[in-house]
Image (tube, rainbow, N blue to C red):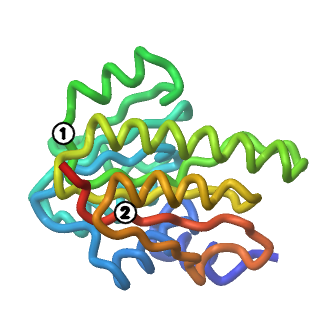
Amino acid sequence: MEDPYTIRARKEGYPARSVYKLMEIQEKFGIIKPGYRVLDIGASPGSWAMYTLKVLKGKGSVTTVDKEPLISSQTNGIETFNFIQGDILEKSTEQKISGRAPFDLILSDAAPETTGNRTVDTARSFGLAEKVICLAEEQLRAGGNLVVKIFQGGDEGEILNRLRRLFERVRAYHPKASRSDSFEIFFIGFGKKT
């Protein structure tokens, strides 16, 4: 049986229910502002990019990165939108991203391919989050913000400590739109230090 968020996403034209996690984060923290240059990592199928473009109201840009193509056709022909198909763990993808930097905001709802083994899945999620933070260190402007997802499994403290060194303020947030059995959490870094 489909949950209410999946049904709502279909009605509102979003390709995935994950958009409501970002909506909650935006409503609570106001992290997306018109004029921002945004990098969306792990963007497929495209719901976060669609929502971000709506919030930007044509002022700013969205660059998305994913190994898989985007499903959303609502980003086609938008001048302020750019899609990079590639793996963020590969140097060639990182070089393409750096050509669009610096960014005011980096969003990552990226998740590893899951195995069903929580220990393996959380370790893979930790590795992805580490890479996203490395990109934030290099590609995020001073004062910029970051939203990164991680699967909870014991390494969150290490990620939090690293983010506290990089940002003025850090918050952990578990959106109501996350599935009830999900062990994901989002870390939000505000104001990258110089």
Q: Residues within 10 Å of mark 1 (few under 14, many from 20)?
A: some
Residue 168 x, y percent position in the rendering: 28, 65
Query: Is residue 33 or residue 185 the one in the foreground?
Result: 185
Instruction: Place residue 163 in its image quadrant.
Output: bottom left
Residue 18 x, y percent position in the rendering: 55, 65
Which three-letter amino acid code belongs to the residue tagged 1?
Pro
Mark with earlier residue (2, 1): 1
Residue 83 x, y percent position in the rendering: 35, 35
* 23 shown above or below 128: below
Q: Which mark is residue 53?
A: none
Which residue was labeled with disc 2?
189
* 115 shown above or below 49: above
Please identify the quadrant where the N terminus is shown.
Answer: bottom right
Residue at 71% over, 74% down:
179
Classify residue 112 as left or right of residue 164: right
Residue at 44% over, 50% down:
72
Which three-letter amino acid code belongs to the residue tagged 2?
Gly
Classify residue 119 as left or right of residue 8: right
Which residue was labeled with disc 1?
102
* 93 shown above or below 157: above
